[in-house]
Image (cartoon, rainbow, N blue to C red):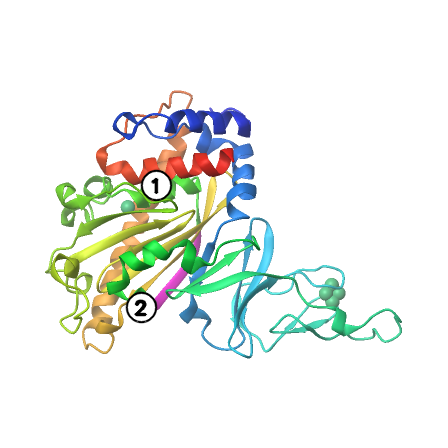
Amino acid sequence: MSQVIDAQTAVAELVANVSTAFEKARAMPKSVYTSEALAELETKKIFAREWICVGRSSSLENPGDYLTLHLAGEPIIVIRDQNGTLRAMSNVCLHRMSTMLEGRGNKRVITCPYHGWSYNTDGCLRGAPAMKQNVDFSASDYRLPHYRCEEWLGWVMVSLNKDARPVAEEFGDVEAMIADYDLGSYREAFSEDFVWNTNWKILAENFMESYHLPVCHAGTIGGLSKLDEMICPPGEKNFNYHTILKDPSFTIGVAHPKNTRLVGERRRMTYLLALYPTLLITLTPGYFWYLSLQPLGASKVQVHFGGGMSPDFLGDADTEKHFNQLKTLLDEVNVEDKGCTERVYRGLCSSAAKPGHLSHLERPNYDFAVWLADRLSA
Ligand code: FES
Ligand SMILES: [Fe+2]
């Protein structure tokens, strides 16, 4: 049975947890995953402040393409305006405060479904019926509030924090480390959204370690991953990563013969990148897939899942077939990860649950815990 734990207690337990050296470290305390009060604190101290990925910019390519989301409770529209600039703005009407758009699509004009006030794609009020008799009303006074929105390596990043460092600065070290992959040129081929019954950090941590591959993924990719070919260096200030080598027989997971950018072992090297808080990218020389997470309280996570190919492979006769096989495989792997991460959440709600020691292959998890402790105790 889970108990009600206040945020202060959970943060104190987390800070104590990361005060142990990695060589002796244990998994994070269960309160960090189960406390609803801590989930609220995370919303305030992490999700309302950091850069959150909302997808690939190629999915919002044309003027008027939009998507909607809630970020830290705020209803937001991300839309490419008529001049090609991508904007993130409030999805709340400036009349009587209805939300406006839902899902994704393309609009030349954003029209509120309540009384029909309409907005241009740059957020300026375009028209409002029957408002001429209000002597104080002037359409030019109205513009939807904007949030930070940047495109970086093909990602669309949004932040509610007006003082956030530019993404390219914040994650400049990531960009330098993977420059020879040319991630910005990878094209998204699919994206999906779903909700899993687990804490967002359990799913993030599941991504950060490949220790679980041989067992959790025994039915799919487990046999392709050798524990002794995984390299887990200490994490950086705002991201962690580890690498694994792909078998050259896995054609789309290794560099295409046309690819002269990648040399040596990097031609079959997969990066697993965790950009805090929740952009989780598997980057191979041939394809990529990613998750972007948002908590729905302590016990549920909203997942945006997408992926696609590097341009070297586009135009190859077999690429589509290979990619379809890959997508089927990724879906099966996802089912396995869903099972593992939902079982962890159920397990750590038990009064008997107690965090065990970490393997050296869980180094990224430790670094993530350090980052969390730092953000939450600030
Ligand atoms: S609330 Fe949007 S037009 Fe009235
Ligand atoms: Fe997995």
Which residue is at 45% across, 25% downward?
A: 13
- Does the beta carbon at disc 2 come under 8 Å from ligand 2? no
* Mark sitting earlier along the chain (1/2): 2
Q: Nearer the viewer, residue 126 or 99?
A: 126
Task: Give left or right: position of 138 versus 44.
Answer: right
Quarter residue 82 falls in: bottom right
Q: Amino acid at mark 1?
A: Glu
Q: Residue 74 at what x, y percent from top left?
A: 60, 53
Q: Residue 354 at what x, y percent from top left?
A: 36, 23
Q: Is residue 144 visible?
A: yes
Q: Amino acid at mark 2?
A: Tyr
Q: Which residues are magenta?
A: 185-194
Quarter residue 340 falls in: top left
Q: Is residue 21 magenta-colored?
A: no
Q: Residue 268 at what x, y percent from top left?
A: 15, 58
Residue placed under numbered mark 1 in the picture? 205
Q: Which mark is residue 186?
A: 2
Task: Give left or right: position of 263 versus 69.
Answer: left
Q: Is residue 287 above or below residue 8?
A: below
Q: Is residue 190 magenta-colored?
A: yes
